Image (cartoon, rainbow, N blue to C red):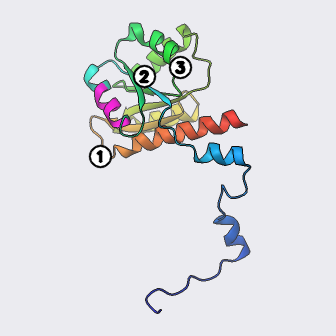
Amino acid sequence: DERHPKPPELTKDEEKIFKDPIKDLKPKEKLERTKTFKDERIMVATQSVDDGDLVAELLRAEFDNVVVSSDPDHCVDIFDKDRPAVLVLAYKGLEKSQQQYLGLYRRSQAIHLPHKTVVLCSYDERPKAYELCKKRYFDDYVPFWPMTNDTSRLLMAVHHALWQLAESLIG
């Protein structure tokens, strides 16, 4: 049919590029690669109850196990109890996120367990957030404040963090 011509055959180099990344994996690896992360623990740490509720509501669209800590005095206890796979730092200002994560790092018993961090930042803080992620202070950043036009970016950042965590645990 002329409206739907047959796609051209791929060259061997093109086949390598467009190869199905899951096809040749062992069954356990396939399971891990295609696993959904609906039940993974996600923690939102923030200084504002309203901000925490907003971020948690967005995350709960895809994740069932989201907990919020808006009290810095209880953040460590919640982290140690829930042992989240992903920590979303939803403080207004990268400096505040750095301070809170450093405090968590110093006081938490569970901080050394495998987890990923996603820091929310303002549009103007993107260059600094990028540098902090490059230095591995955080794993990823999402421009979010004062308002985001792309709420799915946060969800994708959490999915990426979970995929990276799963791959690092497989070896």
As drawn, the label of residue 21 is none
Query: How far apart, in angstroms, are the residues tagged by discs 1 and 2?
Result: 22 Å
Query: How far apart, in angstroms, are the residues tagged by discs 1 and 3?
Result: 30 Å
Q: Quadrant of residue 163?
A: top right
Where residue 53 appears, as percent x and y from the top left, is 29, 26
- Inspect the image, locate mark 2, and give the three-letter code of the amino acid beneath it: Ser
- Is residue 92 found left or right of 101 in the rendered image? left
Mark 3 lies on a secondary structure that is loop
- Is residue 167 found left or right of 127 in the rendered image? right
Query: How far apart, in angstroms, are the residues tagged by discs 2 and 3?
Result: 19 Å
- Report how many numbered discs are placed on residues in the image: 3
What residue lies at 45% left-to-right and 44% top-to-bottom? 156
Q: Nearer the viewer, mark 1 or mark 3?
A: 3
What residue lies at 29% left-to-right and 31% top-to-bottom? 54
The residue closer to the viewer here, 5 or 123, is 5
State the residue position of label 2: 97
- Inspect the image, locate mark 3, and give the three-letter code of the amino acid beneath it: Arg
Mark 1 lies on a secondary structure that is loop
Q: Nearer the viewer, mark 2 or mark 3?
A: 3
Where residue 114 appears, as percent x and y from the top left, is 61, 25
Extreme-bottom residue of the structure: 2
Q: Earlier in the sequence, mark 1 or mark 3?
A: 3
State the residue position of label 1: 149
Where residue 133 appears, as percent x and y from the top left, is 53, 34
Q: Residues within 10 Å of mark 3 (few under 14, many from 20)?
A: some
What residue lies at 40% left-to-right and 40% top-to-bottom? 62
State the residue position of label 3: 83
Mark 2 lies on a secondary structure that is helix
Residue range (magenta): 53-59
- Is residue 61 found left or right of 111 in the rendered image? left
